[in-house]
Amino acid sequence: MFPLSDINPTHRFPIATIGLIGINVAVYFLFQATLNEREAYLLATNWAAVPAEISRGIGPEQTLDIFRAMFMHGSLTHLLGNMLYLWIFGDNLEDRLGIPLYLAFYFACGIAATLAQVMVDPASQIPMLGASGAIAGVLGGYLIMFPGVRVRGLVILGFFVQVAEVPAIVVLGLWFVLQVVNGLGAAGMLAGGGVAWFAHIGGFLAGVVLIVILMRIVPQPAVPQRREWLYDRYDRTRGRGAWW
């Protein structure tokens, strides 16, 4: 299923989510899109996260590389896919956590994703770049917080294409299973590069664990009075209850 939107209204304008999307888009078009293949590789080697360097020790330079890598992408398709998922699922986490905690959650998941890939292939010289690991954490957090929310997307089976609404637990659960299957399938070919499947897995699991912890230590936030007409369908699909 290719997600298009979720039926999950927010109370606040998603400033942080839009800011993250804006920075990612700006970095790609201002610094990466105009580079040739050799220049792009040199930029990734010098600025992105390289497992072999991180596995030797994490100092200030390696830490900076991990953060820079979260805003770099290997292609326009890579960028657009990541930003679509962040736009669909990130705004609701920001709405519930608040901007500071949401950003801390996002970057913590990105760091965990990088370290997961490094643990699997510590000798790799291939640069890691992309927001996928951090966004995988957002997906994991969303799965725990909003499992019953309906996600609208395209179901594609050969020539058959239809718009359908499916619970988030199904959409995101299948997404995670796909990452695990692909990760296990690629385990013997890690040196060849490609998708950092274990970064996706590590980021997703980090998001699940962090949200479970936050559910127990962060009080329910005060939210503005809601507009009943906007929430009518939301309540029918998810049910009234606590914000978690």
Image: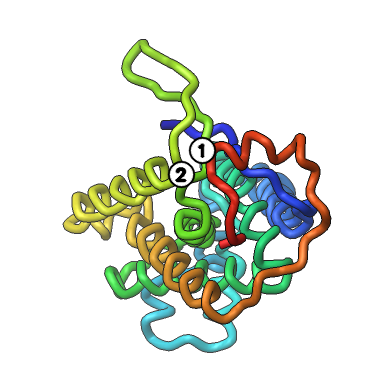
Earlier sequence position, callout 1 versus callout 2: 1
**What kind of element bears circle 2?**
helix
- Residue 79 pos. (x, y %): 58, 44
- Residue 63's place in the image compared with 7, above or below, is below
Instruction: Judge left or right: residue 50 versus residue 176.
Output: right
In the picture, residue 72 is in which quadrant? bottom right
Tell me if I can see residue 214 in this picture: yes
User: Measuring 29% from the left and 49% from the top, which residue is drawn there?
Assistant: 177
User: In this view of the protein, which residue sits in the foreground, 193 or 175?
Assistant: 175
Task: Look at label 2 and name its amino acid.
Answer: Ala
Instruction: Judge left or right: residue 203 versus residue 5.
Output: left
* Residue named by callout 2: 168
User: In this view of the protein, which residue sits in the foreground, 4 or 123?
Assistant: 4
Mark 1 → mark 2, Cα distance in angstroms: 6 Å
Q: Which mark is residue 167?
A: none
- Residue 148 pos. (x, y %): 47, 46
Q: Residues within 10 Å of mark 1 (few under 14, many from 20)?
A: many
Q: How many marks?
A: 2
Q: Residues within 10 Å of mark 2 (few under 14, many from 20)?
A: many
Question: Going by the picture, which residue comes out furthest to the top?
Answer: 159
- Residue 18 pos. (x, y %): 74, 51
User: Measuring 19% from the left and 50% from the top, which residue is drawn there?
Assistant: 185
User: In this view of the protein, which residue sits in the foreground, 94 or 227?
Assistant: 227
**What kind of element bears circle 1?**
strand
Q: Which mark is residue 150?
A: 1
The quadrant of the picture occupied by the N terminus is: top left
- Residue 201 pos. (x, y %): 36, 60
- Residue 83's place in the image compared with 105, above or below, is above
User: Measuring 42% from the left and 15% from the top, which residue is drawn there?
Assistant: 161
